[in-house]
Image: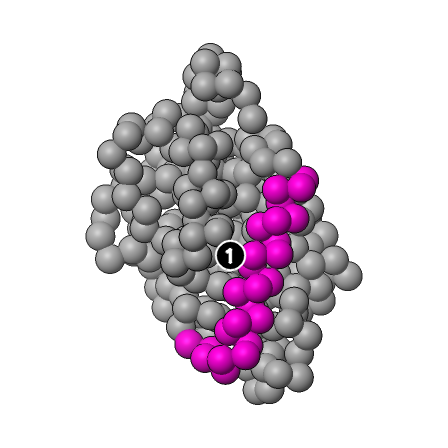
């Protein structure tokens, strides 16, 4: 991670203003990424042992009928409430490298809204539809940003993040819940023929984006899972 002054003097802040997102390469080390993975898998193990597959521990569609028959690392689409896990929250998700970036844009008065891990397992990891994060929030305070830290390599093959650069400069659109939606999404007739950029990351890299930025991730049809 660059020094605070180096970060402030870099092109990153201008990229965020213009494109609505930016990438921080090597925000944490490979060893730190592995420590985060181990913490997440402990969380997954605890959920599996409890059998409490509630709204904060979201299963992949292929695991819903019989979760215990699916390998642990392939079972979950999402684990929420990571802010309740001090080993992850205090050291990494709200640790110094992340806070340095967030404070640059939002100042020192920061409120954490959500803390989740996305586990897109090989072959069965589902898509996340096109949406603006703020379009899913109860409040419409768009003085907010989002971050995603790669624990595994995130590539086009395994369903990396896709964004529409500059879309954060437009309005907040009304989101729609279709019959097959996993959550509310941007109107599908607005999401054809978009000019997208693929956010490919290595372990320890992070991407930060504006709450109005249009983004999506494709299904994982590869043999390689990805956690972030």
State which region is magenta: 30-54
| Residue farthest along the bottom direction in this orientation | 65
Q: In the rendered view, would you say 65 is above or below 130?
A: below
Residue at 32%, 46% in the rendered image: 112
Residue 145 on the magenta segment: no
Name the side, left or right, on which 60 lies relative to 189: right
- Looking at this view, is 96 or 211 the one in front? 96
Q: Quadrant of residue 90?
A: top left
Q: In the rendered view, would you say 83 is above or below 18?
A: below
Residue at 56%, 26% in the rendered image: 1
- Say what secondary structure mark 1 lies in: strand
Q: In the rendered view, would you say 187 is above or below 165?
A: below
- Looking at this view, is 149 or 186 the one in front? 149
Residue at 60%, 63% in the rendered image: 41
Residue at 43%, 52% in the rendered image: 86
- Residue 128: give x, y in percent of width and height: 51, 60
Q: In the rendered view, would you say 128 is above or below 35?
A: below
Look at the image and tell me whether residue 44 can be seen.
yes
- Residue 78: give x, y in percent of width and height: 51, 64
Residue beneath label 1, please? 117
- Residue 65: give x, y in percent of width and height: 57, 87
Q: Quadrant of residue 200?
A: top right
Residue 31 on the magenta segment: yes
Q: Residues within 10 Å of mark 1 (few under 14, many from 20)?
A: many
- Residue 151: give x, y in percent of width and height: 62, 48
């Amino acid at each position: 991670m660059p020094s605070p002054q180096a970060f402030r003097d870099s092109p990153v802040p201008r990229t965020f203003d213009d494109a609505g997102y930016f990438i921080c390469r090597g925000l944490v080390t490979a060893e730190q990424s592995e420590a985060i993975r181990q913490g997440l898998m402990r969380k997954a193990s605890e959920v599996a042992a409890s059998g409490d597959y509630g709204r904060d521990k979201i299963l992949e569609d292929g695991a819903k009928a019989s979760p215990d028959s699916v390998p642990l690392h392939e079972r979950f689409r999402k684990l929420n409430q990571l802010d309740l896990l001090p080993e992850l929250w205090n050291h990494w998700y709200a640790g110094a490298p992340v806070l340095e970036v967030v404070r640059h844009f939002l100042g020192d008065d920061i409120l954490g809204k959500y803390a989740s891990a996305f586990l897109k397992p090989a072959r069965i990891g589902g898509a996340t539809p096109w949406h603006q994060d703020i379009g899913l929030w109860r409040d419409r305070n768009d003085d907010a940003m989002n971050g995603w830290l790669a624990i595994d390599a995130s590539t086009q093959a395994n369903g990396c993040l896709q964004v529409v650069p500059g879309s954060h400069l437009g309005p907040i659109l009304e989101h729609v819940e279709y019959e097959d939606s996993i959550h509310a999404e941007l109107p599908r007739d607005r999401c054809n023929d978009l000019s997208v950029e693929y956010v490919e990351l290595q372990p320890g890299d992070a991407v930060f984006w504006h709450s109005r930025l249009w983004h999506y991730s494709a299904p994982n049809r590869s043999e390689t899972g990805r956690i972030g």
